[in-house]
Image (tube, coloured by chain):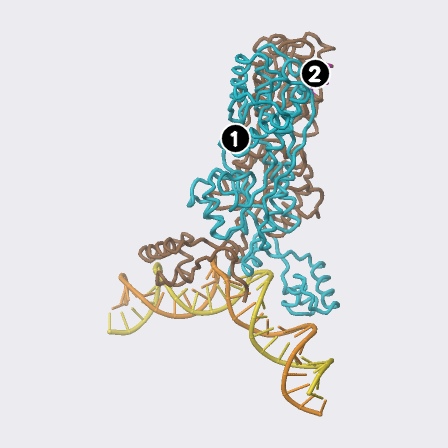
Chain colours: A brown, B cyan, C orange, D yellow
Amino acid sequence: MPVTSPTTFRTTYAEIAAKAGVSRATVSRVLNGDDRVHSDRAQAVIEAANKLGYRTNRAARALSTGRTGQIAVVIDDSPAVLTDPFWGVVLAGISRVLIVHDIHSVLMISPLESEDSPIAHYLEGGDVDGAIFLTVHQEHVVQSLVKKGLPVVVIGTPIDLKSEIVYVDTDNRLGAELATKHLLSSGCKKVATITGDISAVAGIDRLEGYHAAHLSLGIEVNEDLIAHGDWSFENAKTLTLRLLARNPDIDGIFAANDTMALGVMAAIHERGRMVPDHVAVVGFDDNLMAQTHRPGLTTIRQDIVGLGAAAAESMLSILQGETPAPKILPTELILRESA
Amino acid sequence: MPVTSPTTFRTTYAEIAAKAGVSRATVSRVLNGDDRVHSDRAQAVIEAANKLGYRTNRAARALSTGRTGQIAVVIDDSPAVLTDPFWGVVLAGISRVLIVHDIHSVLMISPLESEDSPIAHYLEGGDVDGAIFLTVHQEHVVQSLVKKGLPVVVIGTPIDLKSEIVYVDTDNRLGAELATKHLLSSGCKKVATITGDISAVAGIDRLEGYHAAHLSLGIEVNEDLIAHGDWSFENAKTLTLRLLARNPDIDGIFAANDTMALGVMAAIHERGRMVPDHVAVVGFDDNLMAQTHRPGLTTIRQDIVGLGAAAAESMLSILQGETPAPKILPTELILRESA
DNA sequence: CCGGTTGCGTATAACGCTTAAATAACGAAA
DNA sequence: TTTCGTTATTTAAGCGTTATACGCAACCGG
C-alpha cells in the first residue's frame, strides 16, 4: 500500500459520494460541470463537497486524462535576461490569464541549446500540456517540439519560422515609427538612431520604423545617422559620441531601447550639450529607468502585461485545437522631458 | 476508457518490463535504485529504459506516493515587486537548485491576502510539496500554512515569527554598516541616511547598520541626519533636498537601496553640487541602474542568486524532515565613482 | 537431513479521478 | 398494462506508479 500524502489529508470523491448519497461518477460529473444530472442531486454534491472542503487532486486527474493542467514557461538562463524587469511583468500577464483557467505555470529557467537538452526532454515528457517561450535563440529546437505535437507559443517574432510557430509580439515597427515621427515633427532636422541588435527581429523592426517615419514624412534617410548598437548602455554611449563628433548638428536621437537611451543621454551630457534643448532623445520600452531618470525619458511604452496575457490566450486557444494567428500588440508614446 | 495523452506517447513500465524480460515491479525497483536486484537484470532494465526513451510519469508517481515533486514559488502580484529585477535572479537561484533534485517550480503570482484566498487553498490542496515565499506581508497566513504541515521557506526576515518560520535573508545590518563605515572612513564628516520602509525588517536592519557603523567608530549619531524613506526614487529625492537645506554641510549619504540612491544623486545635482566631490553617495543592492548610472554608484552587493539557492536548499532540507536554521548571506562593498 | 530463515522476484492491490459501457428509472406511446 | 425509447445513474475498467504480500529457491544451524 502506498503512503498517503505527507502534508494534508484530502477528501476524495468517495467521501463526497457517501455524504451526498450518489456514486463517485456522479460526483465527477457535477464537479466537472456536466449538466446531465438532476439539479437536486447536483446541489447535494456541491454542498457535500464544500462542507468537506474538497480540493481536486491534480495528479489523479492528470493520470486519468493525460492532461496535467500545467504550462511550462521557458526562460533563457542568462543574466541579461533574468535581470531584465520586463520578464517579471510578462510572467504576471501569463500567470493571471492561465490561473483563471486553473492552469499552473511551471517555470523552467534553463538554456535550451539543443534538441536533446534536459529541458527539451522535460517538455516532451508530458509533464506539461504546452510551453511558452520567453526568448528564442534556437528556433529549430522549438520547431521540433511543435512537430512532436507540443502546443507552443513564443513571445517575440521568430526570424525564420513565422508561419510554423505561434507567436505574440509588440508592434516594434510602428512603435519606432511613432518615436521617430515625434522627433521629426517636433522640430528636429537631423534625427539619428542607435539600433538594437539587428540580428534580432525587434532590432530590425525598430530600425524599419525609423525608416518608415522618414518615408511617410517625405524626408530622406541619411545612412550616416544610423549606428548599430547592441541594446547596451556602454555601447550606445560610445556610438553616440562618435555620431556627435561626425555630425555635430544632430538634434534628435531615437534609441531602440531605454537602456541605450540613457547611454545616449550620458554621451550628450558628456559633450556638454543639453537634453532636450540641443538634442532630443526618445527611447523604447518605458522601463523603470525611463521614469526615474532626470530628465524623464520620452519613450514608447509596450503593453508588457498584455504581451504575457496574449501569449497565454494563444496557448489556451491551441489547447482547444485552434491555430491562433500571431498577435501584434500596439504601443503608446509616453511624453516626458527628453523630447 | 480515458483518453490518452494528447501530445506525446510515452513508454511505460510495461514496455520496459517486456523488453527486459522482467516484471513491472522489478522495473520500478531498478529505476528507484533498490539494490536488491541482480545486477545483470538491473542492467537489462536500464538498457531497455534508455533504448525506449523512458520518462517517468510524474502524475502517476505523485498519485502513488503523495508527493508531487513540485514547489510553489509565491510572488506578490504588485507592480512594485514584479518590475524589480531582483526577483528574476532569485527565481533563477531557486530553480537551478531544485531542478537538480528533479523538483519543478510552480509560479504563483498572486496577492496572498487572507487564509482562505485561492492561493492558500492551492497550497494546502497538495498540488505542491512546499512553498517558497518571495515576499511576505501576511505572516499569519504563512504561519497557518506551516501549522497545516506545509513545508515553507520565506525569503526575507519575518517581523514577528522568526522562530516559527524558516527563512533566508541578506545580512542587511552588516551590509549597511559596511556602507556607512566606508563613507565615514573615507573622509566624510557628516553622513546622513535615507532609510527604507522601516515597517519592513530590511528597512530596520539597514538603519541599524548605519547606527552600528557610527558606534564602532566612536562617532555620535545625529538623529537629524536620518530621513525615513519608502524605497522610492521620488521620495528619496524630496527627502534629500530637505536634508541638504537643513544641513548644507552633509558630505555623505547612505541610501538604503539603489533606487533611492539615484534619487539622492538627482537631488544633489539639482542643488548644484557634485557627487562625490561635495557629497559622496552609497546605495544598497547593486542593481542594473547602479552600474549604468553616471557617476557609477558605489553600493552593497547582495548575493541574489545565492539567496534563491539558499531558500531552495532550506526547502530540500525541510522535505527531508529537518528544521534548518535561518541563513543570513554576506554582502560585499562594490566601489564605483560615487563614494 | 529437516524446519526455519533469508534472498529475490512476481503478482497484485492501492492512489483518486475519468469515462465508456451497462443498468435503472421514467415517461410516453401502443 | 405492456413495451419501447430516452435520460439519469451506477458499475467498472483503466491511467502508470509504488509498495506490500506472497511464493520459491537456496542456505543455515541444530
Say above or below: B273 vs B289: above
Q: Which mark is residue B80?
A: 1
| Residue type highlighted by circle 2 | Thr
- Foreground: A167 or A7? A7
Q: Which quarter of the picture shows residue A81?
A: top right
The residue at 69%/39% (across/down) is A138
Helix, strand or loop for disc 1: helix
Q: Which residues are magenta?
A: A236-241
In the rendered structure, the answer to whether residue A58 lies left or right of residue A119 reads left
User: What residue do we see at 57% from left, 25% from top?
Assistant: A288
Q: Callout 1: residue from which chain? A: B
Amino acid at circle 1:
Ala
In magenta stretch: residue B260: no
Q: Position of residue A278 (x, y in %)?
A: 63, 8
* Element under disc 2: helix
In this view of the protein, can residue A67 be seen by the observer? yes
Q: What x and y, as percent, mark residue A40? A: 31, 56
Q: Position of residue B172 (x, y in %)?
A: 59, 33
Provide the residue designation for mark 2.
A240
Q: Chain under label 2? A: A
Q: What label does residue B173 carry, if any?
A: none
Question: Which class describes the residues within 10 Å of circle 2: few (<14), some (14-19), or many (20+)?
Answer: many
Q: Position of residue A247 (x, y in %)?
A: 71, 9
Q: Are marks 2 and 1 on the same chain?
A: no
